[in-house]
Image: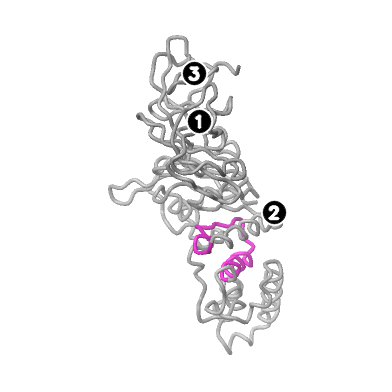
Amino acid sequence: MGTIKLQNINKSFGKTEVLNDLNLEIEDGEFLTLVGPSGCGKSTLLRIIAGLEQQTSGDVFIDDKNVNKTRASERDLAMVFQSYALYPHLTVRRNLETPLRLRDYSSLERFPILGNLFPNKKNKTKKIHDLVQKTSETLKITELLDRKPGQLSGGQRQRAALGRAMVREPVAFLMDEPLSNLDAALRVHMRSELSELHANLKTTFIYVTHDQAEALTMSTRMAVMIDGKLLQLDTPQQVYDNPLSLAVAQFVGSPKINTIKGSTNSDGTIKFLNLELQRKTSITNTDIIIGIRPEHLEISKDHSNNSIEGVVSYRENLGSDMFFHIEIGGDNKKLIARGAPQLTSSISIGSKVFVTRLKGEALLFDQNGSRIKFTSDN
């Protein structure tokens, strides 16, 4: 079992509140990602789960057992740090063996010469060796076991750090931005490897990151944290398609969602710029915010009905996609629209363009950033 439950977790450093009445249940075997901007409290929360930090108030349960007063070493959790935290003077093999030696050997068995006199030490040593060998084969680092961390690449050090966590066979893995020190190509590769590892181990993973791409691609569920609060907990697709607040919508998605000022009239009709949405809302006679993701906008040089006129101020070429930053004037200033390079190659900086939206893809928010529902889906 690897269930973890957090109840009413609060954490303050002096007068600074880091976590605010946070509740979270993590299911056995799931890959849960804690995602949010830097300083939102996600790493602090992970350290509270690990027992490395004490919450100001609230309770932590592991497999339905309250572990508030349980030391970190006794919680049966394995943590992988951003810095990898490998012992630089030890080989990879000894790095993997160290947590097992500390756990399985008695204090007397750890003595270099005297310890060998104890009859059980030989059997324990063989079990440790077999487990390290099995783990190294799983992570494909067998040929690295006799090297020291300084002789490894970033990706190899990452695997070694994972191996040191895996050999303990914990109830859950806690990972604090473990890929942030890798280059972009290696991060993408390691994302797929971590997902495969989770599928094979079927163990609970709790993964902290500020990189939404990692959260969207690897998670069973993702928890979006902002300013010490848990704003939304759902599958990655639901968080992306149906954000419950403007803060979540703006954080999840790259480039970020377009936000446009609009208003509703007495019958709930929604208007913004020179456009009117077909769908209505029950919120009447008020200012609102319309959110439209860049991939839900189409860009063209030709005018059409319900189009927005603008001028391209910047082209962002990502190979498979081209993102256009378009100045539309007024209070809204800019829109970002995505287009296929082969279809938009003739559009350059300074080009006059027309932007149309895909029907049914707009999101509504009130002035406080809360989600507003439509009343019709015409």
Distance of label 3 from label 2 (alpha carbons): 47 Å
Task: Residue 272: tell me if it is visible.
Answer: yes
Which mark is nearer the camera, 1 or 3? 1
Which mark is nearer the camera, 3 or 2? 3
Category of crowding for the residue at label 1, using alpha-carbon neighbours closer than 10 angstroms: few (below 14), some (14–19), many (at least 20): many
Distance of label 1 from label 2 (alpha carbons): 46 Å
Amino acid identity at mark 2: Ala
Residue 66, percent across and down?
52, 49
User: Magenta segment, which residues?
Assistant: 157-183
Pick whichever of labels 1 and 3 is earlier in the sequence: 3
Task: Say which quarter of the image contains residue 122.
Answer: bottom right
Residue 174, percent across and down?
54, 57
Residue situated in front as seen by the camera: 122 or 3: 3
Q: Secondary structure at mark 2?
A: helix
Q: Secondary structure at mark 3?
A: strand
Check disc 2 and report the residue beneath it. 199
Based on the picture, tell me whether residue 374 belongs to the magenta stretch.
no
Q: Does 79 sit left or right of 22 as displayed?
A: right
Distance of label 1 from label 3 (alpha carbons): 16 Å
Q: Identify the mark at residue 354; answer none if there is no mark.
A: 1
Residue at coordinates 42% horizontally, 12% vertically from top-left? 265
Check disc 3 and report the residue beneath it. 276
Residue 92, percent across and down?
59, 77
Residue at the farthest top position: 266
Amino acid identity at mark 3: Glu
